[in-house]
Amino acid sequence: MPSGLGVAVIGAGMAGRAHAAAYRTASTLYSPTLPPVRLVSIGDVQPEFGSLAARRFGYERSDTSWEVIAEAEDIQVVSVVIANSQHRRVVEGLLAAGKHVLCEKPLSDTLEDSRAMSDAARGASTLARIGFTFRRAPGIAYIRELVRSGDLGKVLHFSGRYWTDYGCDPAAPMSWRFKGHPGSGALADVGSHLTYVAEFLCGDLSSVSGGRLSTAIEQRPLPLGHVVGHEHVPVSDDYEAVENDDYAAFSAEFENGVGVLEASRVSAGHANSLMFEVFCEYGAARFDQRRPAEIELFLSEGKSAQNGYRQVILGPQHPYLSGGLAMDAAGVGFGQNDTFVYQARAFLEEVAEIDETSSLPRCATFDEGVHNMEVLAAVTESALNEGTRVSL
Ligand SMILES: NC(=O)c1ccc[n+]([C@@H]2O[C@H](COP(=O)([O-])OP(=O)(O)OC[C@H]3O[C@@H](n4cnc5c(N)ncnc54)[C@H](O)[C@@H]3O)[C@@H](O)[C@H]2O)c1
Protein backbone atom coordinates (compact mmCIF):
# COMPACT_ATOMS: atom_id res chain seq x y z
CA MET A 1 0.00 0.00 0.00
CA PRO A 2 1.34 3.53 -0.78
CA SER A 3 2.57 5.50 2.26
CA GLY A 4 1.04 8.73 3.61
CA LEU A 5 -2.62 9.70 3.76
CA GLY A 6 -4.83 8.86 0.77
CA VAL A 7 -7.72 11.31 0.40
CA ALA A 8 -11.05 11.16 -1.43
CA VAL A 9 -13.96 13.59 -1.72
CA ILE A 10 -17.49 12.29 -2.31
CA GLY A 11 -19.54 14.92 -4.16
CA ALA A 12 -18.01 17.17 -6.82
CA GLY A 13 -20.61 19.93 -6.53
CA MET A 14 -20.28 23.43 -5.10
CA ALA A 15 -18.78 22.53 -1.72
CA GLY A 16 -17.10 19.29 -2.88
CA ARG A 17 -14.80 21.34 -5.09
CA ALA A 18 -13.86 23.46 -2.07
CA HIS A 19 -12.94 20.27 -0.14
CA ALA A 20 -10.98 18.92 -3.13
CA ALA A 21 -9.00 22.15 -3.44
CA ALA A 22 -8.47 22.38 0.33
CA TYR A 23 -6.76 18.96 0.65
CA ARG A 24 -4.47 20.05 -2.17
CA THR A 25 -3.33 23.15 -0.28
CA ALA A 26 -3.48 21.84 3.31
CA SER A 27 0.07 20.48 3.38
CA THR A 28 1.54 23.75 2.02
CA LEU A 29 0.54 25.74 5.12
CA TYR A 30 2.08 26.08 8.59
CA SER A 31 4.95 23.81 9.57
CA PRO A 32 5.77 20.82 7.35
CA THR A 33 4.52 18.27 9.88
CA LEU A 34 1.90 16.43 7.85
CA PRO A 35 2.74 13.05 6.35
CA PRO A 36 2.57 13.08 2.54
CA VAL A 37 -1.02 13.63 1.35
CA ARG A 38 -2.06 11.64 -1.73
CA LEU A 39 -5.01 13.08 -3.66
CA VAL A 40 -6.62 9.81 -4.76
CA SER A 41 -10.25 10.06 -5.87
CA ILE A 42 -13.24 12.32 -6.44
CA GLY A 43 -16.52 10.42 -6.25
CA ASP A 44 -19.67 11.68 -7.94
CA VAL A 45 -22.65 9.84 -9.40
CA GLN A 46 -22.33 12.14 -12.42
CA PRO A 47 -19.20 10.74 -14.11
CA GLU A 48 -18.33 13.99 -15.88
CA PHE A 49 -18.45 16.00 -12.61
CA GLY A 50 -16.08 13.57 -10.90
CA SER A 51 -13.61 13.30 -13.77
CA LEU A 52 -13.54 17.05 -14.38
CA ALA A 53 -12.92 17.79 -10.69
CA ALA A 54 -10.24 15.07 -10.49
CA ARG A 55 -8.38 16.62 -13.41
CA ARG A 56 -8.87 20.16 -12.19
CA PHE A 57 -7.63 19.52 -8.64
CA GLY A 58 -4.99 16.88 -9.48
CA TYR A 59 -6.59 13.72 -8.07
CA GLU A 60 -5.41 10.36 -9.40
CA ARG A 61 -8.87 9.14 -10.45
CA SER A 62 -12.61 9.56 -10.17
CA ASP A 63 -15.27 7.06 -9.09
CA THR A 64 -19.02 7.02 -9.56
CA SER A 65 -19.97 5.10 -6.43
CA TRP A 66 -19.12 5.80 -2.80
CA GLU A 67 -18.94 2.02 -2.20
CA VAL A 68 -15.86 1.80 -4.44
CA ILE A 69 -14.20 4.52 -2.35
CA ALA A 70 -15.19 2.70 0.85
CA GLU A 71 -13.48 -0.45 -0.43
CA ALA A 72 -10.35 1.25 -1.82
CA GLU A 73 -7.24 0.28 0.15
CA ASP A 74 -5.28 3.35 -0.94
CA ILE A 75 -7.81 5.76 0.68
CA GLN A 76 -7.85 6.55 4.42
CA VAL A 77 -9.55 9.99 4.61
CA VAL A 78 -12.89 10.89 3.00
CA SER A 79 -14.97 14.09 2.86
CA VAL A 80 -18.70 13.57 2.39
CA VAL A 81 -20.09 16.55 0.48
CA ILE A 82 -23.46 15.50 -0.94
CA ALA A 83 -27.12 16.34 -0.21
CA ASN A 84 -27.92 16.27 3.54
CA SER A 85 -30.45 13.42 3.20
CA GLN A 86 -27.68 11.16 1.83
CA HIS A 87 -25.08 11.82 4.55
CA ARG A 88 -26.15 9.02 6.90
CA ARG A 89 -25.98 6.09 4.49
CA VAL A 90 -22.62 7.10 3.04
CA VAL A 91 -21.01 8.13 6.33
CA GLU A 92 -22.07 4.90 8.08
CA GLY A 93 -20.76 2.85 5.15
CA LEU A 94 -17.42 4.65 5.18
CA LEU A 95 -16.99 4.32 8.96
CA ALA A 96 -17.83 0.61 8.76
CA ALA A 97 -15.12 0.29 6.09
CA GLY A 98 -12.55 1.93 8.42
CA LYS A 99 -12.26 5.36 6.77
CA HIS A 100 -11.74 8.66 8.61
CA VAL A 101 -14.77 10.81 7.68
CA LEU A 102 -15.24 14.58 7.48
CA CYS A 103 -18.95 15.23 6.86
CA GLU A 104 -20.49 18.48 5.68
CA LYS A 105 -23.05 20.42 7.70
CA PRO A 106 -25.82 19.98 8.69
CA LEU A 107 -24.99 16.47 9.89
CA SER A 108 -28.15 15.10 8.25
CA ASP A 109 -31.63 16.15 7.19
CA THR A 110 -33.30 14.65 10.30
CA LEU A 111 -32.41 14.68 13.99
CA GLU A 112 -33.05 10.94 14.15
CA ASP A 113 -30.52 10.18 11.40
CA SER A 114 -27.95 12.54 12.91
CA ARG A 115 -28.24 10.70 16.26
CA ALA A 116 -27.75 7.37 14.49
CA MET A 117 -24.64 8.79 12.80
CA SER A 118 -23.29 9.90 16.15
CA ASP A 119 -23.85 6.38 17.53
CA ALA A 120 -21.99 4.98 14.52
CA ALA A 121 -19.14 7.42 15.16
CA ARG A 122 -18.85 6.31 18.79
CA GLY A 123 -18.61 2.69 17.68
CA ALA A 124 -16.01 3.39 14.98
CA SER A 125 -12.25 2.95 15.28
CA THR A 126 -11.67 5.92 12.96
CA LEU A 127 -12.47 9.64 13.24
CA ALA A 128 -15.84 11.16 12.37
CA ARG A 129 -15.90 14.97 12.23
CA ILE A 130 -18.11 17.78 10.91
CA GLY A 131 -16.69 20.91 9.30
CA PHE A 132 -18.37 24.00 10.85
CA THR A 133 -16.20 25.98 8.44
CA PHE A 134 -17.01 29.46 9.73
CA ARG A 135 -15.49 28.75 13.12
CA ARG A 136 -12.25 28.96 11.12
CA ALA A 137 -12.93 32.40 9.66
CA PRO A 138 -10.06 34.44 11.16
CA GLY A 139 -12.34 37.41 11.92
CA ILE A 140 -14.88 35.28 13.79
CA ALA A 141 -12.16 33.41 15.69
CA TYR A 142 -10.58 36.77 16.64
CA ILE A 143 -13.89 38.15 17.96
CA ARG A 144 -14.22 34.99 20.04
CA GLU A 145 -10.72 35.62 21.46
CA LEU A 146 -11.78 39.18 22.40
CA VAL A 147 -14.84 37.81 24.20
CA ARG A 148 -12.94 35.01 25.95
CA SER A 149 -10.01 37.23 27.01
CA GLY A 150 -12.41 39.69 28.70
CA ASP A 151 -11.40 42.60 26.39
CA LEU A 152 -15.00 42.81 25.19
CA GLY A 153 -16.39 41.48 28.47
CA LYS A 154 -19.56 39.56 28.99
CA VAL A 155 -21.85 39.12 25.96
CA LEU A 156 -25.11 41.03 26.39
CA HIS A 157 -26.80 40.40 23.06
CA PHE A 158 -26.20 39.05 19.55
CA SER A 159 -27.83 39.98 16.26
CA GLY A 160 -27.07 37.61 13.38
CA ARG A 161 -28.25 37.13 9.81
CA TYR A 162 -27.27 34.68 7.13
CA TRP A 163 -28.90 36.20 4.09
CA THR A 164 -28.50 34.63 0.65
CA ASP A 165 -30.33 35.24 -2.62
CA TYR A 166 -30.04 31.91 -4.42
CA GLY A 167 -33.81 31.33 -4.18
CA CYS A 168 -34.90 34.83 -5.18
CA ASP A 169 -35.52 34.06 -8.83
CA PRO A 170 -38.76 32.05 -9.27
CA ALA A 171 -37.07 30.48 -12.34
CA ALA A 172 -34.21 29.11 -10.22
CA PRO A 173 -34.44 25.34 -10.77
CA MET A 174 -35.73 22.76 -8.31
CA SER A 175 -32.91 20.99 -6.44
CA TRP A 176 -32.44 18.92 -3.27
CA ARG A 177 -32.23 22.16 -1.28
CA PHE A 178 -35.96 22.87 -1.82
CA LYS A 179 -37.15 19.41 -0.69
CA GLY A 180 -37.75 18.05 2.82
CA HIS A 181 -39.61 18.76 6.06
CA PRO A 182 -40.17 22.26 7.53
CA GLY A 183 -36.84 23.60 8.78
CA SER A 184 -34.80 21.72 6.18
CA GLY A 185 -34.66 24.79 3.89
CA ALA A 186 -32.86 28.06 4.61
CA LEU A 187 -32.78 27.20 8.33
CA ALA A 188 -30.78 24.00 7.78
CA ASP A 189 -28.76 25.25 4.83
CA VAL A 190 -27.40 28.56 6.13
CA GLY A 191 -29.07 28.79 9.56
CA SER A 192 -26.97 25.77 10.59
CA HIS A 193 -23.85 27.93 10.09
CA LEU A 194 -25.35 30.94 11.85
CA THR A 195 -26.38 28.98 14.95
CA TYR A 196 -22.96 27.39 15.58
CA VAL A 197 -21.30 30.79 15.02
CA ALA A 198 -23.68 32.35 17.56
CA GLU A 199 -22.88 29.60 20.09
CA PHE A 200 -19.14 29.93 19.35
CA LEU A 201 -19.39 33.50 20.65
CA CYS A 202 -22.22 33.43 23.21
CA GLY A 203 -22.03 29.87 24.61
CA ASP A 204 -24.66 27.17 24.27
CA LEU A 205 -28.25 28.05 23.47
CA SER A 206 -30.60 27.32 26.37
CA SER A 207 -33.88 28.08 24.59
CA VAL A 208 -35.40 29.46 21.41
CA SER A 209 -38.70 31.23 20.88
CA GLY A 210 -40.59 33.24 18.29
CA GLY A 211 -39.71 30.66 15.62
CA ARG A 212 -40.95 31.63 12.18
CA LEU A 213 -40.58 29.72 8.90
CA SER A 214 -41.98 30.94 5.62
CA THR A 215 -41.93 29.92 1.97
CA ALA A 216 -41.96 32.83 -0.45
CA ILE A 217 -41.87 30.91 -3.74
CA GLU A 218 -44.07 27.84 -3.56
CA GLN A 219 -43.10 25.98 -6.72
CA ARG A 220 -40.05 25.77 -8.94
CA PRO A 221 -39.40 24.50 -12.48
CA LEU A 222 -37.64 21.19 -12.96
CA PRO A 223 -34.13 21.48 -14.37
CA LEU A 224 -33.19 20.12 -17.78
CA GLY A 225 -29.88 18.64 -16.65
CA HIS A 226 -27.98 18.52 -13.36
CA VAL A 227 -27.90 21.44 -10.95
CA VAL A 228 -24.65 22.19 -9.13
CA GLY A 229 -24.95 24.35 -6.02
CA HIS A 230 -27.06 27.42 -6.77
CA GLU A 231 -26.48 27.35 -10.52
CA HIS A 232 -29.21 28.34 -12.94
CA VAL A 233 -29.63 25.78 -15.71
CA PRO A 234 -32.27 25.60 -18.47
CA VAL A 235 -35.61 24.49 -17.01
CA SER A 236 -38.69 22.64 -18.26
CA ASP A 237 -42.33 23.76 -18.16
CA ASP A 238 -43.01 21.28 -15.34
CA TYR A 239 -43.06 22.56 -11.78
CA GLU A 240 -42.78 20.87 -8.38
CA ALA A 241 -43.75 22.18 -4.96
CA VAL A 242 -41.11 23.75 -2.72
CA GLU A 243 -41.42 21.80 0.53
CA ASN A 244 -39.37 23.82 2.98
CA ASP A 245 -38.56 27.29 4.25
CA ASP A 246 -37.14 30.17 2.20
CA TYR A 247 -36.88 32.27 5.37
CA ALA A 248 -36.43 31.48 9.07
CA ALA A 249 -36.18 33.68 12.16
CA PHE A 250 -36.12 33.18 15.92
CA SER A 251 -35.12 34.67 19.26
CA ALA A 252 -32.47 32.94 21.32
CA GLU A 253 -31.32 32.68 24.90
CA PHE A 254 -27.65 31.73 25.30
CA GLU A 255 -25.43 30.81 28.22
CA ASN A 256 -24.34 34.45 27.86
CA GLY A 257 -26.87 36.95 26.59
CA VAL A 258 -29.83 36.83 24.24
CA GLY A 259 -30.20 37.36 20.52
CA VAL A 260 -32.18 37.39 17.30
CA LEU A 261 -31.20 35.28 14.29
CA GLU A 262 -32.41 35.18 10.68
CA ALA A 263 -31.63 32.87 7.75
CA SER A 264 -32.82 33.41 4.21
CA ARG A 265 -32.34 32.27 0.63
CA VAL A 266 -34.58 35.04 -0.76
CA SER A 267 -32.67 38.16 0.34
CA ALA A 268 -32.24 40.06 -2.93
CA GLY A 269 -28.78 41.52 -3.34
CA HIS A 270 -27.18 39.30 -0.69
CA ALA A 271 -25.30 36.52 -2.49
CA ASN A 272 -23.66 35.19 0.66
CA SER A 273 -24.02 37.57 3.61
CA LEU A 274 -23.21 36.04 6.96
CA MET A 275 -23.28 39.10 9.19
CA PHE A 276 -23.48 39.62 12.92
CA GLU A 277 -22.87 42.08 15.71
CA VAL A 278 -22.13 41.02 19.24
CA PHE A 279 -22.71 43.58 21.97
CA CYS A 280 -20.73 43.16 25.17
CA GLU A 281 -20.02 44.83 28.52
CA TYR A 282 -17.01 46.82 27.24
CA GLY A 283 -17.77 47.24 23.56
CA ALA A 284 -19.01 45.51 20.43
CA ALA A 285 -17.72 43.72 17.35
CA ARG A 286 -19.13 43.28 13.86
CA PHE A 287 -18.34 40.70 11.14
CA ASP A 288 -19.53 40.67 7.54
CA GLN A 289 -18.63 37.77 5.24
CA ARG A 290 -18.64 40.20 2.30
CA ARG A 291 -15.44 41.68 3.78
CA PRO A 292 -13.94 38.64 5.54
CA ALA A 293 -10.42 40.03 5.88
CA GLU A 294 -11.47 42.67 8.39
CA ILE A 295 -13.71 43.13 11.42
CA GLU A 296 -15.16 46.23 13.01
CA LEU A 297 -14.48 46.77 16.69
CA PHE A 298 -15.59 49.23 19.33
CA LEU A 299 -13.88 49.16 22.73
CA SER A 300 -15.50 51.71 25.01
CA GLU A 301 -12.62 51.74 27.54
CA GLY A 302 -14.90 53.62 29.89
CA LYS A 303 -15.14 56.61 27.53
CA SER A 304 -18.80 56.62 26.64
CA ALA A 305 -18.40 59.75 24.48
CA GLN A 306 -16.22 57.85 21.94
CA ASN A 307 -18.93 56.01 20.07
CA GLY A 308 -18.34 54.23 16.78
CA TYR A 309 -16.60 51.23 15.34
CA ARG A 310 -13.10 51.21 13.87
CA GLN A 311 -11.92 48.93 11.11
CA VAL A 312 -9.41 46.22 12.06
CA ILE A 313 -7.49 44.82 9.08
CA LEU A 314 -6.64 41.17 9.80
CA GLY A 315 -3.10 39.89 9.55
CA PRO A 316 -0.60 37.41 11.01
CA GLN A 317 -1.26 38.49 14.60
CA HIS A 318 -4.84 37.18 14.26
CA PRO A 319 -6.03 33.54 14.35
CA TYR A 320 -5.09 31.16 11.52
CA LEU A 321 -3.14 33.68 9.43
CA SER A 322 0.48 33.33 10.53
CA GLY A 323 1.71 30.68 8.10
CA GLY A 324 -1.89 30.15 7.04
CA LEU A 325 -1.53 32.09 3.80
CA ALA A 326 1.31 31.72 1.30
CA MET A 327 1.91 35.47 1.72
CA ASP A 328 0.71 36.11 5.24
CA ALA A 329 1.09 39.89 5.47
CA ALA A 330 -1.73 42.00 6.92
CA GLY A 331 -4.22 43.31 4.40
CA VAL A 332 -3.52 40.78 1.61
CA GLY A 333 -7.11 39.52 1.73
CA PHE A 334 -8.56 36.03 2.03
CA GLY A 335 -11.97 34.40 2.00
CA GLN A 336 -14.28 31.46 2.53
CA ASN A 337 -12.18 29.05 0.46
CA ASP A 338 -9.31 29.53 2.93
CA THR A 339 -11.53 28.34 5.78
CA PHE A 340 -11.96 25.00 3.97
CA VAL A 341 -8.16 24.71 3.83
CA TYR A 342 -7.83 25.34 7.60
CA GLN A 343 -10.56 22.74 8.17
CA ALA A 344 -8.87 20.15 5.93
CA ARG A 345 -5.52 20.82 7.59
CA ALA A 346 -7.01 20.42 11.09
CA PHE A 347 -8.65 17.15 10.08
CA LEU A 348 -5.49 15.72 8.52
CA GLU A 349 -3.49 16.75 11.61
CA GLU A 350 -5.93 14.89 13.84
CA VAL A 351 -5.80 11.79 11.62
CA ALA A 352 -1.98 11.99 11.71
CA GLU A 353 -2.13 12.37 15.53
CA ILE A 354 -0.23 15.66 15.53
CA ASP A 355 -0.38 17.32 18.95
CA GLU A 356 -3.34 19.72 18.98
CA THR A 357 -1.73 22.12 21.44
CA SER A 358 0.96 23.04 18.90
CA SER A 359 -1.41 23.35 15.95
CA LEU A 360 -5.00 24.08 14.88
CA PRO A 361 -8.15 23.49 16.95
CA ARG A 362 -9.73 20.16 16.05
CA CYS A 363 -12.82 19.84 13.85
CA ALA A 364 -16.17 19.51 15.62
CA THR A 365 -17.42 16.06 16.62
CA PHE A 366 -20.61 14.36 15.45
CA ASP A 367 -22.02 15.04 18.95
CA GLU A 368 -21.60 18.75 18.21
CA GLY A 369 -23.26 18.10 14.85
CA VAL A 370 -26.21 16.50 16.68
CA HIS A 371 -26.43 19.51 19.02
CA ASN A 372 -26.58 21.77 15.95
CA MET A 373 -29.44 19.60 14.61
CA GLU A 374 -31.21 19.86 17.99
CA VAL A 375 -31.09 23.64 17.72
CA LEU A 376 -32.60 23.53 14.20
CA ALA A 377 -35.30 21.11 15.44
CA ALA A 378 -36.13 23.39 18.38
CA VAL A 379 -36.53 26.40 16.06
CA THR A 380 -38.79 24.32 13.80
CA GLU A 381 -40.85 23.14 16.78
CA SER A 382 -41.24 26.75 17.93
CA ALA A 383 -42.29 27.83 14.41
CA LEU A 384 -44.86 25.02 14.13
CA ASN A 385 -46.33 25.97 17.53
CA GLU A 386 -46.94 29.66 17.03
CA GLY A 387 -43.54 30.73 18.29
CA THR A 388 -43.67 28.94 21.63
CA ARG A 389 -40.50 28.81 23.73
CA VAL A 390 -38.58 25.53 23.34
CA SER A 391 -35.83 24.60 25.80
CA LEU A 392 -32.67 22.85 24.72
N1 LIG B 1 -19.49 24.52 4.55
C1 LIG B 1 -20.04 25.25 3.60
O1 LIG B 1 -19.81 26.45 3.51
C2 LIG B 1 -20.96 24.61 2.60
C3 LIG B 1 -21.30 25.28 1.42
C4 LIG B 1 -22.16 24.65 0.51
C5 LIG B 1 -22.66 23.38 0.78
N2 LIG B 1 -22.33 22.76 1.95
C6 LIG B 1 -22.84 21.41 2.25
O2 LIG B 1 -22.22 20.50 1.34
C7 LIG B 1 -23.12 19.47 0.96
C8 LIG B 1 -23.27 19.47 -0.56
O3 LIG B 1 -23.75 20.72 -0.99
P1 LIG B 1 -23.41 21.26 -2.47
O4 LIG B 1 -23.92 22.65 -2.55
O5 LIG B 1 -21.98 21.03 -2.78
O6 LIG B 1 -24.35 20.31 -3.33
P2 LIG B 1 -24.37 20.14 -4.90
O7 LIG B 1 -25.76 19.79 -5.27
O8 LIG B 1 -23.71 21.32 -5.57
O9 LIG B 1 -23.41 18.90 -5.16
C9 LIG B 1 -23.70 17.60 -4.73
C10 LIG B 1 -22.96 16.64 -5.65
O10 LIG B 1 -23.14 15.33 -5.13
C11 LIG B 1 -23.34 14.45 -6.22
N3 LIG B 1 -24.01 13.26 -5.68
C12 LIG B 1 -25.32 13.08 -5.40
N4 LIG B 1 -25.51 11.87 -4.86
C13 LIG B 1 -24.29 11.28 -4.78
C14 LIG B 1 -23.84 10.03 -4.28
N5 LIG B 1 -24.69 9.14 -3.76
N6 LIG B 1 -22.53 9.74 -4.37
C15 LIG B 1 -21.66 10.63 -4.90
N7 LIG B 1 -22.03 11.84 -5.39
C16 LIG B 1 -23.34 12.15 -5.30
C17 LIG B 1 -24.15 15.25 -7.22
O11 LIG B 1 -24.05 14.73 -8.53
C18 LIG B 1 -23.49 16.64 -7.09
O12 LIG B 1 -22.43 16.82 -7.99
C19 LIG B 1 -24.41 19.76 1.71
O13 LIG B 1 -24.41 19.03 2.90
C20 LIG B 1 -24.33 21.26 2.01
O14 LIG B 1 -25.07 21.64 3.16
C21 LIG B 1 -21.49 23.34 2.85
Image (cartoon, helix red, strand yellow):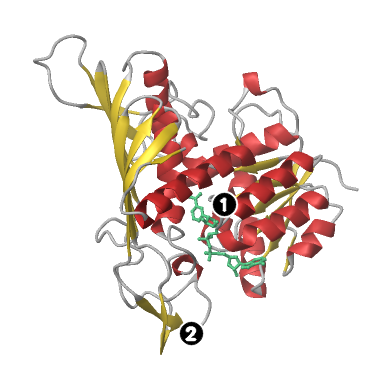
Where does the image place residue 367, in percent across and percent down from the top left?
62, 38
In front: label 2 or label 1:
1
Q: Is residue 248 visible?
A: yes
Between residues 239 and 43, which one lies in front from this camera angle?
A: 239
Q: Is residue 365 visible?
A: no
Q: Amino acid at mark 1?
A: Leu
Left-right relation of 177 to 39: left
Label 1, secondary structure: give it.
helix
Left-right relation of 68 to 179: right
Where does the image place residue 358, in percent across and percent down from the top left?
63, 19
Disc 2 to disc 1: CB gap under 8 Å: no
Between residues 260 and 152, which one lies in front from this camera angle?
A: 260
The residue to which callout 1 is attached is: 111
Answer with the quarter of the image where residue 237 lies: bottom left
Between residues 243 and 273, which one lies in front from this camera angle?
A: 243
Where does the image place residue 300, in percent across and percent down from the top left?
20, 15
Pointer 2 local density, CA inside 10 Å: few below 14, some 14–19, many at least 20? few
Residue at image x 36%, y 36%?
A: 293
Between residues 234 and 153, which one lies in front from this camera angle?
A: 153
Quadrant for ligand 1 reads bottom right
Q: Does the residue tagged 1 have its C-beta within 8 Å of any atom of ligand 1? A: no
Residue at image x 46%, y 44%?
A: 375
The residue to which callout 2 is attached is: 224
Label 2, secondary structure: give it.
loop
Residue at image x 41%, y 53%?
A: 380
Residue at image x 63%, y 74%?
A: 48
Quick check: 304 above or below 389?
Answer: above
Q: Amino acid at mark 2?
A: Leu
Where does the image place residue 17, in percent across and percent down from the top left?
57, 57
Kindly give the residue lying farthest to the left in the view shown.
305
